[in-house]
Structures are given as C-alpha cells and as structure tokens.
Amino acid sequence: MNEDQFRSTYKKAVDSMNPSEEMKKGLLAKMEQHQETKRPRKTIFIAASIVLAAGIGLASPTIWNQLNGPASPAEVAQVDPGTSGTGGAASAGSVVIPKLKLPDSSSGVKASMIALVVYKGNIYTQSATRIEAADAAALRGDRLGRTTGGIDELSGKDEYTELSSNIGETDIYTVKGYDSGFLIMSYSEIDGQVFAELYEHTNGITVNSGADLIGKLNLEGRIASAQWESFDSWNNGLQQYAPLSGSETLDGFLSALLAAKPLAAEPLIAQGIYDSEDRKVIYLELQDKTRVQLVLFGQGLVRYGDAPVFFEVESGAFQALWNSMEQ
Amino acid sequence: MQRFMSRPGNDVIKSYETYSKMLFRIALVHLGSRQDAEEATQDTFIKLMEKAPEFKDAEHQKAWLIRVLTNTCKTSLGRGWRKREIKLEGAEPLTADSPEDLAMLQLVLALPVKYKTVIHLYYYEDYPVQEISKILQISESAVKMRLKRGRQLLKLELEGAEPQ
C-alpha cells in the first residue's frame, strides 16, 4: 500500500469511530461533581500490615487514597491469587515481576503494545531512561545483532525468537557502563541522522530492594545534574523544570532508594494511588548523558518507568527531598 | 486571549462540541478500548475546566488538549500491564463500518504506542513533523524516526519526499 492509499483508507476507518452519547452525559456529571466544594484533603495513613493470601504475601505498609472517602481504619491490600501471573506478585519483603509474554495479535488488538525487543530469551521494553541521539554513539558498545521484521514476526508466536521485535529492523548494541542483562540500545544511522533508543529488561525478576531495579542504573556518584517538575507542569506539558538544590539531600534520597522496600504496584493502583495529583517528577542527567526519570508520590513512594513495582523510601530521606521541591 | 469559565455549559461544552471527536479518536488509538478512550477524553475536558488556561488561538487550544489527553493516556497505560490485559480480555471487540476499515484500524492499533500516536497525528490529523514535535514534546528527529518505523511496520511505500 502506498502512502496516499493508507492516508485515505485510514481516515475513512477512523471517521467511523465516534464517541457515544454517554460520553457527554458522563462529562456533564463529572463537571457537576467538580462544581461542588472540594473536600478538605485528608491525611493519608500508612499502616504496617502483613497479608498472606494463598501463598502470596504482601509485606508492606498499606497505603490508600482517602481523597474521596471517609477516613477509615487501616485497610489491607489484598492480592488476588489469580493475578500473580502478570501483575507483580509479592512474597515477604520482595516483589516478583513475572516474565512478560509476547503479544499475540491473533487474540485481537493489543492496544497497549509497547515497543519491545527480544534478547537472550527476555523481553526488553522501551526504557524510562532516555538518551539524545547526539550522545548515543559514545555509549554504543558491542553489536549484538539486528532485529527482525515487526508485528508479523511476533504474531501468534509462543517462542522467544532471538532479536524479534516490534520496532522494525535496526541494529542492537550493548550500552557501555551497563549490564546487557538490563539495558541494550537500538542504534541506526539513516540519511546521516542517528536514531537511538534504550530498552530495558525489567520483567521476570525478583525485586528485594531498590538496588535490584534502580541499582542497575548505577546512579551513585554519576549524577551530573538534577531537575524536578511539578505534576501540574508535567500534566500540562509546561516543561517547567527547576534545579534540585542540595546534593546531600539528593544523595541521601538515592541511598535510601537503593535500600527501599518494594511494593507490588497492582494493589496500590487499585487503591487509587494515581487518583491523586500529589506527585513530582525528578530527572537525573548522568555523566554519560543518559536521563533517568523517577516519579515521586506524596505517600513516600517512588516508581521507575512502567515496572509494576513501587519503592517505599525511608521517610526522612524522602521528605527531605520532597520538601526541597517547592515552587 | 480566550479565557474559559469554569462553569458547565459554557466554553468547556463548546470546546467539547468542537474537539471531542478528535480527542476520542486519539485516545482510542492510544488505548484501544472505547470505554477507556471516553474516560480519558472526559478527564481531559475536566482538566480544561479546572485549569482554565489562556489560549492564543484555536490551534493553541487544540494542541494543549491533545497534549493533556496523551498524558492522560500515558498515565492510564502506566497503571500496569495486568490491568490492561484484563480490560482487553473483557473489552467489547472494536467494530467498524466495514471489515476493511476494521482491518486498517487493527493494523494501526497493533503498533507500539509511540509509533501509532505519531502515525495518527501525521496521517489523520495532518499535522506536520514540527507540530507533532511541539505537541508531544519530542525532538523532530524522534518524530521522523517514529514515522519511519511506523511506516516500515505498516509496510507503507512512500511516494514523494520525506516530510520536512
């Protein structure tokens, strides 16, 4: 199919997709709700509890969002035994992130299909760490091979075919300074332009502390500069970055992050952690020019990328950094 | 400067009438389910009501709405693979006017998110590379790369020059 045919066919197909009347009704209802006086913000409780459910334990403080409900005694995050296959099951003090399965397009559309590469039997997904094209060459290590094809290569396959991907054909390299079991790079030069992306392996692993995931980024002693962004700026695309002041505060936070206890993401998400806007984003530019993004949640938690795990950072170190980020 | 009043029935609803279909379609490409797409679209207009930003013109407003919507979709996608898989398993299958339309939609929906967003903005909304770069806040070279990769995956044969 040529470009013009695609454009017209795609436009025709998309034109047939219209929202329902319910969408407008729902919006009006939401708007009316927002007209009501906002409830005063309630304290978010953190209560230590241990749950054991059908052999799957969640050893963590249970945090829940009370922004829209009455204060309640400490609730317990239940882990549905049936969800242990994909959501990040937990055992005492650790979170097991199950191995990602290859998308099977024969079962229908995978709307959330993420960019991925298969290397050594593991799925690497687009990294939450970024590198500018101009800086990628310096980080490029050994060539591992070339990815094959795309969607058709993956469709309906059960096998993890080496270097299959859904990103088209491109060369894959190790990344200098990083374990290739964690981070690899796609790199190609097209018409004199460099195109590079980082892919990370954050599934099929057991996380006992921040060191098991964040530690692979080798942050300590390598931070060239650090910035933060408010949720409002991030959410509205304002890109209002401010420098993080106080290297000691940041160092203390990062040390605490490496030692931080992991919490399975799923129960926290179910409890509405994303319903709150009590979030700040920090950007750490490392000496090798990579840019690491971490999301801090007001409840004292940190998340890196889409790995289904949060880290509960020691409160003193967390609050010191959190409080230093004031507009 | 255009200032939105934070009262239902005023400019937010006018904006809804103007932009809701466009935003819903972008959200649908992102999220693949009608229910999620409608929710993300509603949330975008709620943010418009809450923030009441000042816009230079209609294009400025449109770009702001797309950016907020894509952030909303990103957050939704970041909420965990398991949740999305459950939703996909239980979601009503997408329907279209014809099997050809459905096949085309499924082809694009099956692309990785970062590619299909750019493909949609370029081929459906007719945004040039520079504008997509501003809306998604990625470099122009990244937009070009994603277009190129998207085209490769869709097996498109280019006719004419690369977008500038």
Image (spheres, coloured by chain):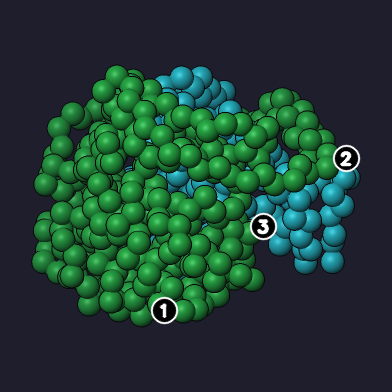
Please give the chain letter of the residue carrying mark 1. A
Compared with A306, A110 (above or below) is above
Total labels: the figure holds: 3
Q: Position of residue A84 (x, y in %)?
A: 30, 27
Q: Left or right? Give the position of A21 relative to A105.
A: right
Residue A97 visible, this angle: no
Chain A painted colour: green
- Name the quadrant of the N terminus of chain A: top left
Labelled disc at residue B9: 2
Circle 3 crowding by C-alpha within 10 Å: few under 14, some 14–19, many from 20: many
Q: Are marks 3 and 2 in contact (CB under 8 Å)?
A: no
A236 vs B145, nearest the viewer: A236
Within 10 angstroms of label 2, few (less than 14), some, or many (20 or more) residues?
Answer: few
Name the amino acid type tagged 2: Gly
Could you tell me which residue is drawn at 22 percent across and 42 percent down?
A206
The residue carrying mark 1 is A247
Q: How far apart are the two marked residues, 1 and 3, measured between alpha carbons?
A: 35 Å
| Left or right position of B18 against B153 | right
Q: Which secondary structure, mark 2?
A: loop
Chain under disc 3: B
- Nearest the eye: A270 or A320: A320
Query: Which kind of residue does numbered mark 1 sit on?
Result: Ser
Q: Is there CB contact under 8 Å for labels 1 and 3? A: no
Q: Quadrant of the C terminus of chain A?
A: bottom right
| Mark closer to the observer (1, 2) | 1
Q: Are marks 3 and 2 on the same chain?
A: yes
Res. A21 image quadrant: top right
The residue singled out by tag 3 in the image is B64
Looking at the image, residue A265 sits to the left or right of residue A216; the answer is: right
Q: From the viewer's perspective, is the residue at label 1 or at label 3 nearer?
A: 1
Looking at the image, can residue B116 be seen? yes
Between the C-alphas of marks 1 and 2, the distance is: 49 Å
